[in-house]
Structure formats: C-alpha cells, structure tokens
C-alpha cells in the first residue's frame, strides 16, 4: 500500500477474517493456501497505481509467504470519498496527509 499508493508508513487499517477450512470454498485447481484479499479504497487512484498494487501483492505474497499467484484472488472496491466516513467526517471533507490521486 505504501509503495503502490503512496500511503504514509504509519497508515494501517487491516482486518483479517480467518475461516475454518470446512467453511471456506476452494475453487477447482486451488490449494489449501487459497487466499482472498479484498481492499476498500476511496476513488481516485489511477489504473496504473491499482495495477501496481495488485502486482506487488502477488509478488510479495509469493516471496514472503510462499503462496503462488494461482492461489491468490484480489479485488479492489472503490468508494466515492463522500461515501467513506471516519473521524466524524466524510472522505471529501477530510484533510489527509497523503494524496488519493496517485
């Protein structure tokens, strides 16, 4: 996120939802390492920045965790800043310490 989307180093808001193997569907051709990553973002990142993020995730997951790209599914969900709320305001009202349009 820091490298691809120019997030500040201290910007971290991650949630992990582990599931029991019997509760998780593995598509054909995937292994028990199958991993689904869903990322919510405020709209504004370029196609190039989003693709850079996706490719960095694939390569980092393979390098550091040994999970092959065939076992990783990534989806980016973009939300208009006016529909994203935090710290008592919407994203279009907030003064962020980083740029959205990268």
Image (tube, rainbow, N blue to C red):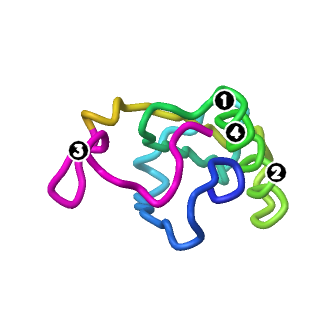
**Location of residue 70 by image quarter:** top right
**Whole-percent x, y for residue 30 in the image:** 70, 39
Whichever of labels 2 and 4 marks the residue nearer the N terminus, that label is 4
Question: Is 36 situated left or right of 51 in this image?
Answer: left
Mark 2 touches mark 4? (CB < 8 Å): no
How many residues crowd around disc 4 within 10 Å: few (fewer than 14), some, or many (20 or more)? some
Q: Residue at x 49, y 42 (%)?
A: 38
**Whole-percent x, y for residue 98 in the image:** 51, 55
How many residues crowd around disc 1 within 10 Å: few (fewer than 14), some, or many (20 or more)? few
State which region is magenta: 84-102
Q: Give 95 or 87, whichever is nearer the viewer.
A: 95
Mark 4 touches mark 1? (CB < 8 Å): yes
Residue of label 3: 90
Whichever of labels 4 and 3 marks the residue nearer the N terminus, that label is 4
Q: Which mark is residue 28?
A: 1
In three-dimensional space, the C-alpha distance between marks 4 and 1, rounded to whole angstroms, equals 6 Å
**Whole-percent x, y for residue 26 in the image:** 57, 39
In three-dimensional space, the C-alpha distance between marks 3 and 2, rounded to whole angstroms, equals 33 Å
Question: Is 64 situated left or right of 41 in this image?
Answer: right
């Amino acid at each position: 996120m820091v490298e691809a989307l120019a997030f500040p180093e201290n910007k971290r808001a991650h949630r992990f939802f582990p599931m029991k193997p019997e509760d998780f569907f593995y598509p054909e051709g995937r292994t028990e390492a199958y991993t689904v990553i869903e990322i919510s973002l405020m709209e504004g990142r370029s196609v190039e920045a989003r693709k850079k993020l996706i490719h960095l995730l694939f390569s980092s997951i393979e390098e550091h965790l040994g999970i092959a790209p065939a076992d990783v599914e990534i989806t980016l969900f973009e939300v208009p800043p006016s529909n994203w709320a935090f710290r008592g305001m919407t994203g279009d009202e907030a003064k962020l310490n980083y740029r959205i349009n990268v």
